Image (tube, helix red, strand yellow):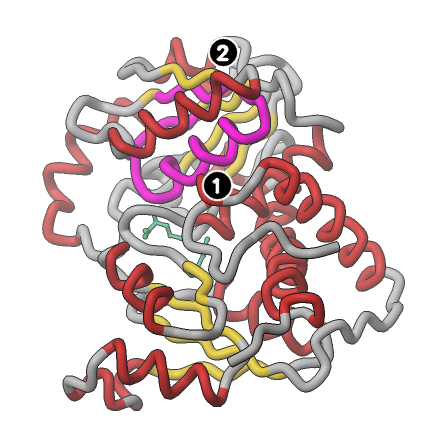
Amino acid sequence: RTSGLGKDLLDVAAIPRGEIEYLLTLAARLKDKQRRGLPHPLLQGKTLGLLFQKPSTRTRVSFEAGMNQLGGHALVLPMGDIQLSRGESVADTARVLSRYLDGIVIRTYNHATVEEWAAEATMPVINGLTDLSHPCQALSDLLTIREKKGRLRGLKIAYVGDGNNVANSLIEATAKTGMTIALGCPSGYQPDQHVIDRARLEAAGTGAAIELGHDPQIAVKEADVIYADVWISMGREREQARRLKVLAPYQVNARLVGRAKPDAIVMHCLPAHRGEEITEEVLDGPQSVIIDQAENRLHMQKAILTRLLGKRKQRAS
Ligand code: CP
Ligand code: NVA
């Protein structure tokens, strides 16, 4: 089956709905194989580069381990070690690395930087998080929600706190799959307006809904999933004092969780700041699925890699 992903994976919004379904199926299949110890060397001889301008635990390790499990190789390129840090252009770096690598994951600040990489590189470029979005996270989260709830369509997810990159990608992912996302974010901390407008168009075709709001109590009402992320994303450290104050009423705690459906699951992309956006009690409580959620990064990203770097994606160059 030919990949409907296109060359790159920069945002969930650009992925056709059918391809999201396919990725979910493939990820589940690869997860089953890995769990049963069955080899699945779908990317033998392929090399993936990983370029991080921000710290990472899950993204880096899951891509690296995933590439190994697929029979390929991954190469972390510390920013300070490559000439990009001494002023070499993205264009030159991208064109040269495309001759060595079969794909690259990039974590950076400006979303425009990954777009520039995608435009210049002839290899697939995967967004490993920008200030705007975190597509690999949201796609993996769909897998987790589907595993836990048996479906996606019709479910309600409440996103509480800072309307950041993770929120933006979740909005896109829920719009694609017919879910309702209710935002409980302070004013001034709402998700990206362009993302919302684009997702609303998509939602019209899938039965999804995007409910904007400032009240976490309203957001979690009847929710099947409660989702939290840090209040101070990477790069926002200087805003710490103000954010801690504005976001304090948005903590995901036992009282808030108690207002959702009794069988609601609690998600957090991690890393968590325990006692800030979420309490220890909730994070480690029976409704939390955070570790399974983190595991699924591995399986979904292996599906993404297989689709972008696999045989059927060979291009003339
Ligand atoms: N959730 C996530 O992307 O984690 P890392 O920052 O550890 O990669
Ligand atoms: N919103 C967080 C996500 C980290 C995985 C950040 O950008 O730092």
Q: What residue would you read off at disc 1? A: 268
Q: Is residue 196 left or right of residue 187?
A: right
Q: Secondary structure at mark 2?
A: loop
Image location (x, y in percent) of residue 298? 63, 60
Q: Which residue is mark 2?
A: 259
Front position in the image: 155 or 17: 17
**Classed neighbour count for the residue bearing mark 1: other residues with Cα under 10 Å, few (<14), some (14–19), many (≥20):** many
Q: Position of residue 175 (x, y in %)?
A: 49, 27
**Residue 143 coordinates in the image, percent (x, y):** 65, 41
**What residue is shown at x 77% (from left), y 56% (from top)?**
31
At label 2, which amino acid type do we have? Arg
Between the residue at mark 1 and the residue at mark 2, the CA separation in whole angstroms equals 18 Å
Q: Which residues are magenta?
A: 159-183
Task: From the viewer's perspective, tell me whether residue 194 is left or right of residue 57.
Answer: left
Query: Residue 160 magenta-drawn?
Result: yes
Image point 51% across, 52% down: which residue?
136
